């Protein structure tokens, strides 16, 4: 995966919510530039992230549970579903830089539909609060 060289120094998590939002948007802009994302695709990325976790916590595990009571194995800002991506580790999924790179790459390749939040937004079941 590409690395967003546009960030001056690595982000130190946890940080305040306002700083997390700025950091997430900066990563979206950086990777959006690498993958030549449109403004709409960058907005989609932020909407997906903030729908999954309004607190923008890079260590988040999905709160979804299966019928058998086991918790879904999706992690990080981009809620990468590890069983669907066996080549990605939990540590990678929880890394903000990696997670947003993965998200922007998939969105620009037309794969936003793999995120539940994207499908909820398209179905009108979630209204994003992003600008």
Image: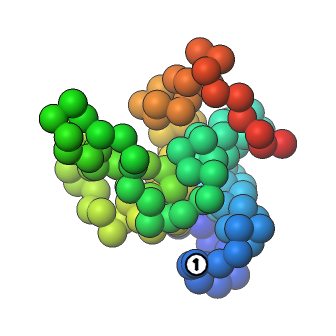
Quarter of the rendering occupied by the C terminus: top right
- Secondary structure of the residue carrying tag 1 is loop
Residue 81, percent from left and from top: 32, 45
Q: Quadrant of residue 123?
A: top right
Q: In front here: 70 or 21?
A: 70
Mark 1 lies on residue: 14
Residue 55, percent from left and from top: 62, 59
Residue drawn at (26%, 47%) of the image: 71
Q: Is residue 125 left or right of residue 71?
A: right
Circle 1 residues within 10 Å: few <14, some 14–19, many ≥20: few
Residue 3 appears in the picture as rendered: yes
In this view, 99 is above or below 49:
below
Q: In front here: 84 or 71?
A: 71
Residue drawn at (77%, 68%) of the image: 18
Q: Residue furthest left?
A: 68
Residue drawn at (53%, 45%) of the image: 52
């Amino acid at each position: 995966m590409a690395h967003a060289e546009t960030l001056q120094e690595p982000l130190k998590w946890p940080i305040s919510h306002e700083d997390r939002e700025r950091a997430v948007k900066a990563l979206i802009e950086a990777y959006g530039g690498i993958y030549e994302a449109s403004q709409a695709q960058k907005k989609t990325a932020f909407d997906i992230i903030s729908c999954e976790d309004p607190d923008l916590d890079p260590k988040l595990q999905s709160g979804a549970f299966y019928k058998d009571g086991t918790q879904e194995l999706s992690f990080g800002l981009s809620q990468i579903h590890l069983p669907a991506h066996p080549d990605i580790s939990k540590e990678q999924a929880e890394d903000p830089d990696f997670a947003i790179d993965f998200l922007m790459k998939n969105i620009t390749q037309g794969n936003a539909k793999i995120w539940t939040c994207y499908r909820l937004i398209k179905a009108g079941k979630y209204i994003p609060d992003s600008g």
